[in-house]
Image: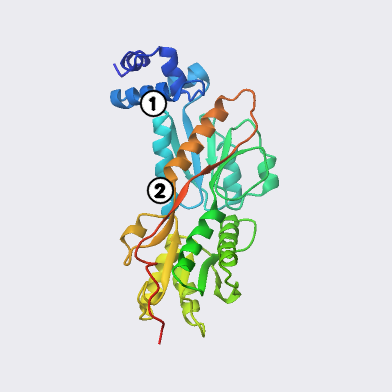
Amino acid sequence: MGVRLKDVAEHAGVSIKTVSNVVRGEAHVSDATRERVLRSIAELGYRPHASARHLRTGRSGILALAVPDLAAPYFAELAAAVIAAAKDLSSTVLIEETGGDPEEELRIACGLGSSLIDGVLLSPLRLDQEALASRPRRMPLVLLGERDYGLPVDHVLIDNVAAAREVTAHLLSLGHTRVAAIGAQHGPASATAHQRVRGYQEALYRAGVPYDPALMCEVSAYRLADGVRAMRSLLELPEPPEAVFCFNDLLAAGALRAAADHGLSVPRDVAVAGFDDIELSQYSVPSLTTVAPDKAELARLAVTALLRRIEDTEQAPPAVLYAGHRLVVRESSGARGTARP
């Protein structure tokens, strides 16, 4: 026989009802009690029986997470963090990749047509606001990412403007005045790019450095090849940049490659910084200065918000929740080197 609620209750020194409340994500449990119960659940290896729970409560304990691209390291690492956060709360996560297809994003936002899905965590890319607004509201939904739909839906994100401003200010603080940016995009699907452009420009303004449009590179995607192409174009300018802020770490890795191909040393000849703090950033040569979103906190906030929404019979007002971030300074920014010949 497997571990039962009763076993967890005895181990934690609480009632079976309290264990049940923790498993279901109920809010009216103290943090200390919740932590004690979760520790007992982990130590005993308790896992709710999905079919029994579904029959008893009408809920399966299965959450859906949909992201645009699982091949992108940031989304893969975020998915792992969501799985871990859900497991701590005795929930299972079904992972879906949308490819940025608006029809697929809407299908998932509606619950994939399955009665076994309790709620959805969605990182939308091209989903139309009107389409999202018209979906059946019976499926609990939490949005991830920077796009603001202005809808009564819980939303979890980081402050991209502040983060971009901080990393740009770091590059400026090293004495660089020609600081370029790689990652600008246009259109409603480019909320991340818009916010990082804004943070970059705010940092320039605060430092008294004029914005130079020639130093703002647009890209079609946030992949390695896009970073290589953008960095090459910057290095071909009559007056190349002294530092480059890339809007994600893959773009920054591509920029490092392009700099090496031009015979430049990073950070002596040009400083480079990225965004996301994916695992690659620690092991690139040189290691990459980057913004590190707190993926664990983001996942915990998102899963907790979704579970509370699933249990919410009074329909509390939607919340906008921010996860933290920090600037991780590594070798690729360094101190300002000697001028180019």
In this figure, which colouring scheme has been used for the structure? rainbow
Q: Nearer the viewer, residue 222 or 113?
A: 222
Q: Quadrant of the C terminus?
A: bottom left
Task: State the SS at label 2.
Answer: helix
Identify the residue position indicated by label 1 in the image.
35
Q: How many marks?
A: 2
Q: Nearer the viewer, residue 275 or 313?
A: 275
Residue at image position (36%, 15%) is 9
Task: State the SS at label 1.
Answer: helix
Residue closest to the far bottom: 341
Q: Is residue 222 visible?
A: no
Camera-near label (1 vs 2) is 1
Q: Earlier in the sequence, mark 1 or mark 2?
A: 1
Amino acid residing under circle 1: Glu
Q: Quadrant of residue 156?
A: top right
x, y percentage for residue 227? 46, 69
Residue at image position (47%, 66%) is 173
Q: On the picture, is 64 further left or further right than 7?
A: right
Task: Please tell me whether residue 12 is drawn above or below residue 258 in the rendered image.
Answer: above
Of the numbered discs in the image, which one, if any, rests on residue 211? none
Of the numbered discs in the image, which one, if any, rests on residue 77? 2
x, y percentage for residue 308? 54, 28
Rate crowding at label 1 as few (under 14), some (14 to 19) or many (20 or more) other CA atoms within 10 Å. some
x, y percentage for residue 109? 59, 40
Amino acid residing under circle 2: Glu
Residue at image position (55%, 24%) is 311
Task: Please tell me whether residue 274 is drawn above or below residue 341 in the rendered image.
Answer: above
